[in-house]
Amino acid sequence: MNKRRGNSVLCIGNDPIHLNLRCSLLKEYGWNVFSSGSGHEGVIRFGQERVDAVILDLNDDGVESALIAGELKRLRPEVPVIMLVAEVNTLAPGATDQADAVVVKSEETRRLPDALKVVMGTS
């Protein structure tokens, strides 16, 4: 995987409250944040913006998230995708296969900024 240095992050999530909180958190860490309220909208935004990483949180069993992550990787395989999950053991088999990193939501505030640094190759 080619790791790139940049600071643009696209957050895709279908829970507006958590999406706004996540964007605020990342802005505090110096990230330039774009957001989308659905997977479909996120794929379109991904095609329109220069994005260095994607954070994907669709509050599902992982099937929709896997489809969206797969489409993002098909469009630009070099852009890392971090998938947020409620619990890894409740996901559909193979749901996180397209993700470069997986963060459990209960640890998001503590682990997400570090996970971004790792997938971006800046840690």
Image: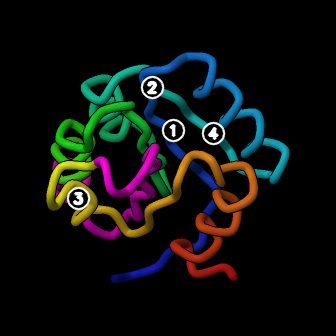
Q: Earlier in the sequence, mark 1 or mark 2?
A: 1
Which quadrant is home to the N terminus? bottom left
Question: What residue is disc 4 on?
Answer: 33
- Give the percent coordinates (x, y) of residue 48: 36, 35
- In this rendering, position of residue 38 left or right of residue 102: left
Q: Which residues are magenta?
A: 71-90
In the foreground, 82 or 94: 94
Please give left or right for residue 11 compared with residue 18 in the image.
Answer: left
**Residue 36 disc label:** 2
28 to 110, vertically: above or below: above
In the displayed structure, 79 sits above or below 50; it is below
Mark 4 secondary-structure assignment: strand
Report the Cα–Cα distance between label 1 and label 2: 6 Å
Mark 1 to mark 4 CA distance (whole Å): 7 Å
Amino acid on which the number 2 mark rests in the picture:
Ser
Q: Earlier in the sequence, mark 1 or mark 4?
A: 1
Of the numbered discs 4 and 3, the one sitting upstream in the chain is 4
**Which residue, given by chain and number where applicable, does mark 1 sit on?**
11
